[in-house]
Structure formats: C-alpha cells, structure tokens
Amino acid sequence: MNERETLKINAAGHLEIGGADCVSLAERFHTPLYVFDEAHIRTMMRVLRRTFEEEYGGRGLVLYASKAFSCKAIYAIAQAEGIGADVVSGGELYTAMQAGFPPEKIFLHGNNKLPSEISYALDCKVGCIVLDALSEADLVEAEAARRGVVQNVLIRVNPGVEAHTHAYIQTATTDSKFGFSVADGSARRMTETVLRLPHLRLLGYHCHIGSQIFEKEAFVLAAQKLLAFVAEIKRSIGFEAQALNLGGGFGIWYAEGDAKLRPQDYRGYLSALIAAVKRECARLSLRPPFLFVEPGRCIVGEAGITLYTVGTIKEIPNVRSYLAVDGGMFENPRYCLYQAKYSAVLANRANEPATELYAVAGKCCESGDLLGVNFNLPKAKRGDLLAVFSTGAYNYSMASNYNRNLVPPAVLVRDGRAEYIVRPQTYEDLVRNDVLPNFTDR
C-alpha cells in the first residue's frame, strides 16, 4: 500500500480514506464505488499553484486536465483553489459551465474539434482554443468573424521528445495525431497561416509529451526544444510567443516500481520546468513567457480509490486463482487497454498479511475482462471488500455501459464525511434514450 496521507488502517483493521471507513462507505453507498479524498485534491492544486507564485512571480496558471475526471464538483474545487481548466469536448465544457466555472480560465483542446464544439466555445467566451489542424484555424476564424470577436489561440506543436511511457500515451513524437511537427516545418507554416487571420490572436504554443512520466529531464528537454523553436520563429518572421503551455503528464504511484511521491515532491517537476524556461530565455534573448501547465492525473489519481465486493473465487491448480468483483472493464478499462498496473488490499481486512496471488476479474462477458493479474492479498472469500488504489484518474471518465452494466457513482470524502458527487445510474437511465421504431414488428 502506498503510504500517503489520504489512506490509513484504523483500529478495526479497516481501510480509511479521508477519515472515512471504507466498510461503512460500502454499506452506505454500495459497490462498485469511486471514492475521492477532497483534501488530497486541494493539496495537489495548491502545491502547483504556489510554485508558480513563489518561483515565477505568479506569471503562470495551472489548468486542471478535465479528461482525468470531469464532474461539477471537481470544477467547483478547482475554481475555489484559483486554477483554470482545460477541456477536450463540448461535454466537458458544458459540465464546467454548469458548475459556474469562469470561462476565461478555460482552454479548449482536441485534435478534431467538432464545428458545434467550436461554436459553443466561442459562445461561452473561453479563454483560449488550442489549434490542432489547419482546417480548424479556418473554422475558428469563421466563427469568431461571425461574432465580431478576436479569439485567443495557441498552436499545438510536437517538439520531437519521446517520453518513457506507453506508446499509446506518447503524444509529442513526429508520428502523432496531435499537433504540428517542428522538425518538418509544419509548425512554422501553421504559425504563418494563423498570423494572417484577423480574428485570431496567436498567444504562442502548446506541447504535451505524454502521460505517466517520472523523468524531469523529459519535461526540461521539451521546454528547451520548444523555446528553441520560439527563438527561430522570432528570428525568421518576427513573431515572439508571449505564452507557452507545457502540458502535463507527471507520473503517479500505481504499483511496485512506481515512485512514491509526496504532494510536495511534485513541486520539483514544475520547478525544473520554470528553471529551464528562465535559463533558455536568457540564453536565447527571449522575454520569459506566461506559462501554463495541465496536470490531471497527479491531482486526482492518488486521491481516488475504487471499492468492490468480492464474488466468485475460482482456483485453477497450478495455473491461477481468479477473484471476481462486481466491477470490471466497464468501470475501469485501463488494464484491457494497456495493461495498467494497480495495487489493492482487502479493505475489511487491511492489516492481514498477503499470502495469496490473484487475478482480479470483472463481471463482463469477456475473457479479457480483468483489472490485473498479480494482486497480493490475504486469502479472500465471498463478501470481502476489495479496494483498488490510484483510480481517481481515467476510470470514471473512461467508464461505459458495456453489457448494460451501470457506471458506478462517485463520492467525495472530507474529514470523515462523504457525499455523492456523481449519483448512481439506474436501469431506467439505461433505457431512457431507447426508442422502438414504428416499423418494428411486435
């Protein structure tokens, strides 16, 4: 178990999160259940915001990466903590707006923004749109012209940094669906195009090198390459970027082999980026730009756990022991997608020694429906409560109704109190949009 302030084992031998007993949470809210510790979320937001304040004179803004976990409550917390948000769909933008989030602190991303999403973003008066295609620049220009406004934009570029992470979550290599390559000249050509459009105000550039990265050097190298590009653009066409968005991707602890970082340790990632920007700007005779970063996983990932009730246990001699739970790939598809690793305990017997090795199976009708294959646990029995750690990011946000299973609810805990932030789905919710056409025989 990762020893961090959000989790502990109480006198009853039960796992606690944010002062709330997990057994009591399961009894009250049922399982499967996403649980988030509000204090941990706020701590992470404050650490990063204060780093900008103390090390860069406040000339930066933390943007919460909504794709990690989006609901009204998370935007309310982000607003209270004085940070912004990035959104990658009309749905995320709508959720933020419904929560009363200030639109001037919202950035819209996406490699294929729909015309309707661009139109909605302009109606909301979002602070910035990150351009990811030449045709997209034309769409934003046309919508801005129709409204008689000038829209702030950044251009997403690929600096050519290959981070040490899973291939599916590397995003800044030349071969990527995201952004414009610095190496092949397309980033420069896009810059020249945008500067000619009268209803777009080019603030600068955006890059994001991937996710679940622990090496600070990768972030520093990306900043160096991006600033070298900024200097080249200034020299060749006279445009100097006034803002840079250096993305997110800071790694978190999931399982053995991952770094166990305290919230304060994440200051080091941002400090290294700030130091690199200051150093390179001085070397290249550039004005230090306003900086943005987009952390998501590191803010909510370790703040969340998922609780399950153990069902069937199947032991195959000399092969494997399966422990089935009431969740599965419908509420956490990350193992199925890229073999993501997790750690877990039996929350109702959290201080008992782990003597068995289990593959944790879900309830979907798929042989590949697994949450992982190497969980060390006490010998389990039907009715035990399994707690899987570090599920706050990309679990609820990637959930589905596969097999017509219900997406679990989410609760927020604070000082032992717990309340819904996403209510449970019902079977009525599943069929609410179903329609029987008139020509169907019945």
Image (cartoon, grey):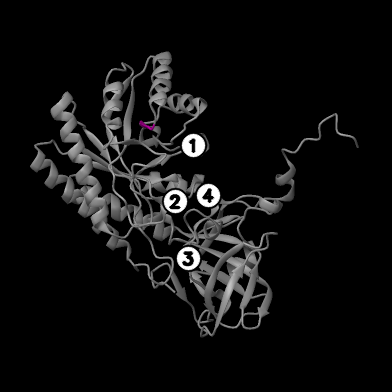
Q: What SS does tag 1 mark? A: loop
Residue 78 appears at what percent x and percent y? 40, 47
Q: Main secondary structure of the magenta part?
A: strand
- Total number of numbered discs in the rendering: 4
| Alpha carbon distance from label 1 to label 2 | 20 Å
Identified at 48% across, 50% down, the residue is 69
Of pointers 3 and 1, the one earlier in the residue sequence: 1
Of pointers 1 and 4, the one earlier in the residue sequence: 1
Q: Which residue is mark 4?
A: 397
Q: What SS does tag 4 mark? A: helix
Is residue 65 shown above or below 264? above
Q: Is residue 408 left or right of residue 240?
A: right
Of pointers 3 and 4, the one earlier in the residue sequence: 3
Q: What SS does tag 2 mark? A: helix
Q: Quadrant of residue 174?
A: top left
Q: Is residue 130 magenta?
A: yes
Q: Which residue is mark 1?
A: 89
Crowd class of label 2 (few under 14; some 14 to 19; many from 20; radius 10 Å):
few
Residue 277 appears at what percent x and percent y? 17, 45
Q: Quadrant of residue 267?
A: bottom left
